[in-house]
Image (cartoon, grey):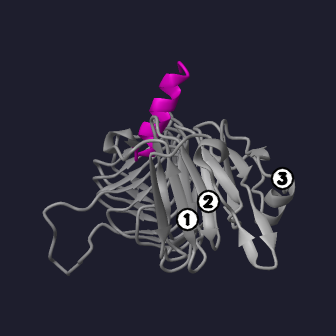
Amino acid sequence: MTDPVGVFVHEKALCESSAIGAGTRVWAFAHVLPRAIIGADCNICDHVFIENDVVVGDAVTVKCGVQLWDGVRIGSGVFIGPNATFTNDLFPRSKVYPEKFLQTVVEDGASIGANATILPGIRIGRSAMIGAGAVVTRNVPPFAVVVGNPGIIVGYQASPVATPSATVANALLGEKAGSKLALGVEGCELWRMPHFADLRGELAPTEFSRDLPFVPKRSFVVYGVPSNKVRGEHAHHTCEQFLIAVHGSLSVVVDNGRSRNEVVLSDPTMGLYLPPLVWGIQYKFEADTVLQVNASHPYEAADYIRDYDTFLKVVHAGQGA
């Protein structure tokens, strides 16, 4: 049947909610409880159950066999694959109910693969991709690709510029000290550092006032990072950074709110310049990797932007959007 506001409900579905947007379709054997809120142009497939304290945005696809329990919040443009499982209680017991169920949030544009399991209280960032069968136990950053049990980040979505491997980046950058390679993300560059080699070994010296884009006020090293962990995930209002993998290898994602790219740092003669208002992520650390970070400013907590949505607002405000 079709209701007056353009919502299609199959004759064998049970839709008790009136808070459903125009163009949404609820198919056979689906059950939507009275207080659920569902946006426009959604597709609720067969055998889907949606509990009361659930909010679903616009243009969402929920494939067969999915249950959305109290506390689940789904953004717009989200895809939820067949038999994906959401949870809302960390310590479930029969006939024992928490005072309030944990809230699980899936942000706009994210995709959840078939048979994935999402633990309660998790936030899945915008446009993230959860692989089929993954078990998500921690928050997922925007654009991240997560697979496995437990889920780990293996990549990032939406990089309009091809990710240069370490070999390709080295070739494009060249061997001459002072060479630079733009990464297609405004202001971000790879730099070739001074370096010397002879029979005694190799040397990569740095004169701060000459070889770096700024004179550092602070320097620190990141080491001992498990390969499945992610570092960074923030931007700075004013601080500039210059990253060098002095040992080992890692991948760095750079994002200015309009374009994104990823580069592999695996050579101590190669540095990555990050200007202010660039979202940076470091991951895929090889064992024993040591990352040196030079910063143009002393540590200031207020200079950090740690939430991606806040970062986008700051960037867009600066562009007059």
The residue at which mark 2 appears reads as 244
**Residue 137 within the magenta-colored segment of the rendering:** no
**Residue 316 within the magenta-colored segment of the rendering:** yes
Q: What amino acid type is highlighted by mark number 1?
A: Leu
Lower sequence index among marks 1 and 3: 3
Lower sequence index among marks 2 and 1: 2
Lower sequence index among marks 2 and 3: 3
Disc nearest the viewer among 2 and 3: 3
What is the x, y in percent for residue 82? 56, 67
Q: What amino acid type is highlighted by mark number 2?
A: Ile
Q: Are marks 2 and 1 in contact (CB under 8 Å)?
A: yes
Tell me if residue 66 comes above or below residue 6 in the rendering: below
Question: For the residue labelled by badge 2, is the local secondary structure a helix, a strand or a loop?
Answer: strand
The residue at which mark 3 appears reads as 176
Residue 244 vs residue 26, the one in the foreground = 244
What is the x, y in percent for residue 70? 29, 59
What is the x, y in percent for residue 148? 55, 78
Residue 59 vs residue 207, the one in the foreground = 207
Q: Residue at x 81, y 59 (%)?
A: 170
What is the x, y in percent for residue 116? 51, 72
Residue 183 vs residue 45, the one in the foreground = 183
Disc 2 and disc 3: Cα gap in Å? 17 Å
Disc nearest the viewer among 1 and 3: 3
Residue 241 vs residue 42, the one in the foreground = 241
- Residue range corresponding to the magenta coloring: 305-321
Q: Please state if 207 lies on the left or on the right of 60 as rendered.
A: right
The residue at which mark 1 appears reads as 291
Q: Are marks 2 and 3 in contact (CB under 8 Å)?
A: no
